[in-house]
């Protein structure tokens, strides 16, 4: 066909096929089949309740829809691209199965409110799955933290060693981030779980349906407030894409640390075989492939957010076909975020931390120097001078290639006679960590409190989610 | 200096000046001066409570800080770039004013927790201002909606006329969007209003401060849970940047409609002079400059979100100087979103809607054709045939250049004898709108309910915000 | 396996499967099979030339590779996810086919330079396809422009009618944009068509290969300059993603106009059936679905650009697994941009412009008012006064609901006695367009020149591309 | 004024002031004053050439414009926000200075073509400045590379030590990236240096101006091809924003390495004092602030690109006020990219590399293991077995905490008797690097060639730019 065109000759497929490929959505919206069927069953009941169909018709419709669900789940359903989308595929099959009564199902409904409902149900379900997966990662962090309260390492600012910290404190920082993500999802769900059924094409159905009854039937928190908004609003997807971006960003930060710590110059962590690729020649070498990929996947998750933001900019009311482009970004973000969380839960659990190497590095960093300066101040030496003397002692220790705590009392006293035996307690790294028992600090008590608070919260959430 | 370099000769300013310009933040973080002083006063009280400073010292510090606040507000404060940031500028002045006791203020605090606190206080304050401004826009929409319940226009899908709607329904769609934005901010605020004081550089202070006491003093909801997270977390800004993006996106949609409606082919709206530029030659012409600019500004707001997402990707714990780049995106988004809301509140209020033109357009669009088809179905004509007959009647009306409702009964009956006198009621546009009284629909009753619900909500929020 | 984990029980698939799914790339890099085989054949010849394999071995390898290409093309090749990527799948099959000599193919090569080569060849081929498709769209624009030189419509600024223009000028504006896109691709190709073969893992091969020989064999313009850059560089993809974003943005602008013009208030254009969905009730109604979707797809194309920008930010040398995420964004952008161009070529060609409606709208807009003001100035009336008088005449015409050119000379002279018979020539819209014959203007001569310049350029490019 | 509004009371500034602040552009487009004056002078000459003004008028205009340029440069010009933009500010002053003839300057010109010209001239000038600054960074890299040809360090893949490389090769990788950036700018400039003068508002001027004459006068490569495209096109800014994004991304990669190498676990590099902040207590500690900030600033540069992409999406022809938002993103990107390049040139030059630490790390990584395996293969041992034996030898060396090259011949022979004295040459790291003399490899000869090629190129470019 296109071949006859003056400009043509190049395109092998006739135009109608190109248009069909371009505009069809069944390739991706078929993933919403379960939600489409749940929504249709609720709508059928709603029609029955309003007296638009009778009980026999309702039963036929419900039975037909259940059978279709089964066919799809068992891979026996024949998806047809020429029927464009999941809705038409299912409707066509329904009519095959139950006859003309199948055509009544679409009464008082439009594809505009139907697709909005399906997608809202889908997003809600996936967000809850993310929550479960977040709990798993938090759980892994808690298990590792619990085992590493006494594991000390240098805490970094500017990627420079700054102060001694407990590895548990470091791990728990991520647990708290992910808890925030969990709560962000919680907030988002309130705006996702809204039923648009009854909004019809844009102006509201003329039939006496009860949007509040149907939202209860669907287990949703709210019914739509305004029919035009109901069919044109994609804020709920945007918000899900944003929350997913924050989750993946948090994972990317933890991945970057794993990659760094697995470098032999650090050597803080050893990766489980499954999450790395090795070398037959150099047995000690391991490439942290999963962590790298997970960090890299942040790109696509951000990209998906930008995609929908771009689509919605300047779009006039109400439904425009541009909105069909809302699904693929979310499907991709969902796949990425969920798989990343699953793998992170296990990878984190299986990390082997090298506490010896961490401690060594801590000592080389002279991270008890601040403690020493504070000690000198407590001995009545003015602040500026205390700092200066500490600098001299660090230089002395560096020369001798030892830690400050390995200098003898005599050596220290040559620099500053006020130093006494009690300095060794001050210079002890465990003491330094211990002293930071302020609520939320790296002190062991503070960590114990954090652990118990997080465990309690986690247990409560687990209960709610099942 | 740079001139002596082998590669040099080109750069006129010596390097140290370039570095100072590049790294200083006082040019923009000075906008946080009020928050810095509030935070410092709370910290000073906290130090006094812990016995680290005495009451006299506290009084001196508080007095000094108050004086600085006054100096800045009155434009008498001399900001010095070489002091890098707002914190050092204020501290230096404090020491000038109160002497050595000024140096004690920074005890048990680091710039890392200090800047996090200042910025959290700032973001919280601005978000509340956005909420107030959102209420103003909603208010304007309510006022216009109330006056335009009976104004009918074609509702669009695919930018094609689809069904008759009330202008009020259209306006309220935006009110509901903005209400969601308000609620998103509410959720976000819970995560913004967290005090990081006591986290110190990254590991927690060694002093016996009480983070919970100080957060109450600051009127914040929570204290930090983990010191490392406290200084490395910028989720709260991200979330504010996202919420701002959604707000501006909503405004861009409304702007796009105003621009479209102001085009003479539509002619639905006339812009207030202040929000448009005119032509001395063509008095009827008005460029909707403010609406265009507002739509365009969506770009920078999205860009600011992407900026911070990019910064945080793969960033290891804890504080890294990259984080200094968190402020300018928010300042720009804040300026843009807040000014846009302010102007939108007034522009919306002053729009003159041309109800005559809307009705004319509605009639030309044959938007009562669906009603007619439904009518034929109700007369027992099968669905498919009803559609076909309606198509014929539309063609007839088009030929005669009249509306369907302007065809005589005889004319209609030539196409379909079952049509009776009661068809005119069906074809009446007001009746068509009226019929959509489903909760949330465009029916007049539904609109009345929406109006009263929104007004009630708005009144409650106004009370809470003041 | 995962079920035994303390945290587990939830994940149904064992970890190794999850990791395999997460890290495999064969699902998408299989699209590069042709390039992988072309690259391997060139590398095999290169090995033979360097004496690393003999002629018989070379022949075996070439034959095996050709067979694999055939198997894949005919859908007989069994892709195996557990072999991770396209390279390993093909290599494994090669060893099956030709035995141990197959193992020699990877001598002096690493997956790092191999994948970079494959992807460069792929991107280059696709960019050339975009160029061909751009020529087709330009061709459609030229055909339509040629037929619409005398079709006048109002040119808009601020979406307000501003000056009369020829539809051809409007269409050609898009042709010039797309020509720029063509040239941007040309520039980009120089940086894409670089052979990385010989860079090996990162440091350069130790074998005496000749990178310049092999790049000639591959028909590429350059060989890599630095082995570390060769394996870590993804600028070439970024640039392709950017060029694709600009193309899609241009299409989105043209789509937005088609959507607008198809609205009955404008009525400037009627869409071919294949590119729109209709209504059985309202025969005149057509939803411009393809144009809407194409505009919406700008989102994903921008998102893909952001994805790779995010990935590359702050990534240290050399190859990191994050880079595996470079392919999917390009594959998606390629699919989108290419299909959009194909459809736009045909949709543009098939648009039916309603010149009558355009002219009517032009007249209603009083777009000859500027011409009139200029005329008055030429009659010696001071500029300001001329503008004022023109405004009065427009008001008069508006009152009478006629165009300025429909006012009688007497009517005009009541406002301004200096007006003479020659005013009607000035007020003629065709004259107004004609006067703008400045090179590049909307005058008919200028348009003829543009048409001939573009045709000549197009013909030359077509020759080069085949 | 706003106070009287029913919704008002909150906004302290009257609306007109808010609108003025929101819509004015003089706050940022004043940076284009030089280009506005250059453009106006060329336009004045063009008017004279066409006989629209006489020579005396031309002289007056040129003199007036020159005086304004001087006033602005000397800070004596009074910018007035109420005059909105740079063009009106200059025009108003011109009329003050030269009287009514000043009003003639705007003949045959519109703000639409005027602002496009100004911005094109500005972007072109800034891009050339970026080119100069890129040459400076390349120069610093060349100087450091030249001094570090013999400095060996481990080359990383997956941030794991992979093969020994020369530091020069690593540095030159960046030089080649930046050379590409330089060339991208070159390509971009062709599309930036286009004169839109004569396009007028959108349809082309009616005056007999010669766009080709004026583009020569302005030193630009082309005149506009289509008047509507000329005023609506912002591709040239987009492209500049993209090129800037790639530059900043490249810098972010180098910064990430500097930050990593400055960490004491690596200790590969020591930062110049000016580019870091130190600690009075720990003299060895340095925070790489400038590198961190530079990496962080990638965010804003990406954000600026997204901003303009967003603005242009779906924007109909021709000029829309949205386009005013094109300037600030570019100004910010320009400021950021240019300052980053300037600082990077100096920072790179002043880096002190710790070759001792690099070599130590190299040895610990057993990066000669691959060489050993190749050696065994050359001794006739099958590939798989060679790998296995190498693994055993690495384990032996690890046990003894020595490098492979520090094992005695006897020790090696216990694992593999075929090993002979010549193994030590193979194990020598310098030999390993040397062997990679393939063009573009890390071999010393290859590096020498790269250095001389880059120097030659650089010298040529420098000549062209001045």
Image: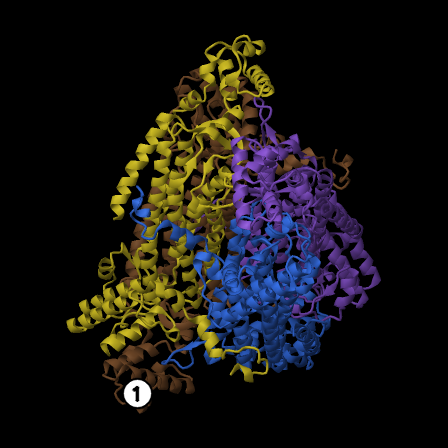
Chain colours: A yellow, B brown, C blue, D purple
Instruction: Give the side of residue D174 with respect to residue C286, left or right.
Output: right
Residue at numbered disc 1: B409
Q: Most extreme residue toward the right, as rendered?
A: D55
Q: Eyeballing the image, is C94 above or below B88?
A: below
Residue at image location 82% in from the left, 64% down from the top = D54
Residue sitting at x 58%, y 55%: D325
Count of numbered marks: 1
Residue A376, image x, y percentages: 51, 14
User: In the depicted view, which residue is nearer to us: C69 or D379?
Assistant: D379
**Residue at the extreme left of the image, as rendered:** A55
* Residue found at the far front of this picture: D417
Q: With A192 as the anchor, is A46 left or right in this view?
A: left
Residue D22 higher or lower than D318, as above or below? above
Q: Quadrant of residue C276?
A: bottom left
Give the image location of residue A130, x and y in percent. Answer: 35, 50
Residue D88 image-quadrant placement: bottom right
Q: Is residue B259 above or below residue B131?
A: below
* Residue B324 screen position, x and y as percent: 54, 38
- Residue C260, visible in the rendered structure: no
Q: Measuring from the top left, give residue D64's x and y in whole percent.
A: 78, 53
Which quadrant of the structure image shows residue D290? top right
- Callout 1: few (<14), some (14-19), or many (20+) C-alpha neighbours within 10 Å? some
Seen in the picture, residue B120 relative to B242 is either above or below; the reply is: above
Where disc 1 sits, the SS reads helix
**To which chain does the residue with label 1 belong?**
B
Of C252 and A406, nearer the camera is: A406
Residue D238 appears anywhere in the view: yes
Q: Which residue is located at x 39 percent, y 47 percent? A: A343
């Amino acid at each position: 066909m296109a071949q006859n065109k003056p400009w043509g000759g190049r395109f092998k497929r006739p135009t109608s096929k190109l248009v069909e490929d371009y505009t069809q959505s069944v390739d991706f919206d078929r993933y919403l089949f379960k939600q489409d069927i749940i929504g249709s069953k609720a709508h059928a009941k709603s029609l029955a309740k309003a007296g638009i169909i009778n009980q026999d018709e309702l039963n036929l419709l419900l039975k037909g829809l259940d059978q279709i669900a089964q066919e799809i789940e068992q891979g026996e359903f024949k998806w047809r691209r020429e029927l464009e989308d999941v809705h038409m595929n299912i409707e066509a099959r329904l009519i095959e199965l139950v006859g003309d009564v199948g055509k009544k199902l679409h009464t008082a409904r439009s594809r505009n409110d139907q697709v909005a409902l399906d997608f809202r149900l889908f997003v809600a379900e996936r967000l809850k799955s993310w929550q479960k997966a977040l709990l798993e990662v938090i759980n892994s962090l808690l298990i590792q933290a619990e085992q590493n309260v006494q594991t000390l390492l240098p805490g970094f600012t500017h990627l420079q060693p700054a102060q001694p910290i407990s590895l548990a404190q470091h791990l728990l920082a991520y647990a708290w981030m992910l808890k925030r993500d969990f709560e962000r999802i919680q907030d988002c769900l309130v705006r996702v779980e809204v039923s648009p059924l009854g909004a019809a094409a844009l102006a509201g159905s003329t039939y006496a349906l009860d949007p509040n009854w149907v939202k209860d039937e669907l287990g949703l928190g709210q019914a739509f407030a305004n029919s035009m908004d109901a069919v044109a609003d994609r804020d709920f997807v945007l918000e899900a894409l944003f929350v997913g971006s924050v989750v993946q960003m948090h994972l990317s930060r933890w991945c970057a640390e794993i990659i760094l710590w697995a470098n032999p110059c650090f050597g803080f962590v050893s990766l489980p075989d499954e999450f790395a690729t090795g070398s037959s020649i150099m047995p000690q070498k391991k490439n942290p492939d999963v962590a790298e990929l997970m960090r890299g996947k942040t790109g696509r998750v951000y990209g998906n957010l930008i995609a929908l933001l771009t689509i919605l900019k300047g779009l006039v009311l109400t439904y425009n076909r541009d909105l069909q482009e809302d699904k693929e970004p979310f499907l991709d973000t969902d796949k990425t975020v969920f798989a990343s969380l699953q793998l992170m839960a296990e990878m984190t659990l299986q990390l082997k931390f090298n506490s010896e190497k961490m401690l060594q590095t801590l000592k080389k960093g002279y991270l008890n120097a601040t403690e020493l300066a504070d000690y000198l101040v407590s001995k009545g030496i003015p602040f500026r001078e205390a700092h200066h003397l500490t600098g001299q002692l660090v230089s002395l220790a560096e020369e001798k290639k030892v830690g400050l705590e390995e200098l003898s009392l005599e050596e220290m006293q040559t620099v500053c006679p006020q130093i006494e035996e009690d300095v060794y307690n001050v210079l002890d790294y465990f003491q330094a960590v211990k002293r930071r028992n302020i609520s939320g600090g790296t002190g062991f008590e503070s960590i114990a409190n954090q652990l118990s608070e997080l465990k309690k919260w986690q247990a409560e959430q687990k209960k709610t989610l099942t």
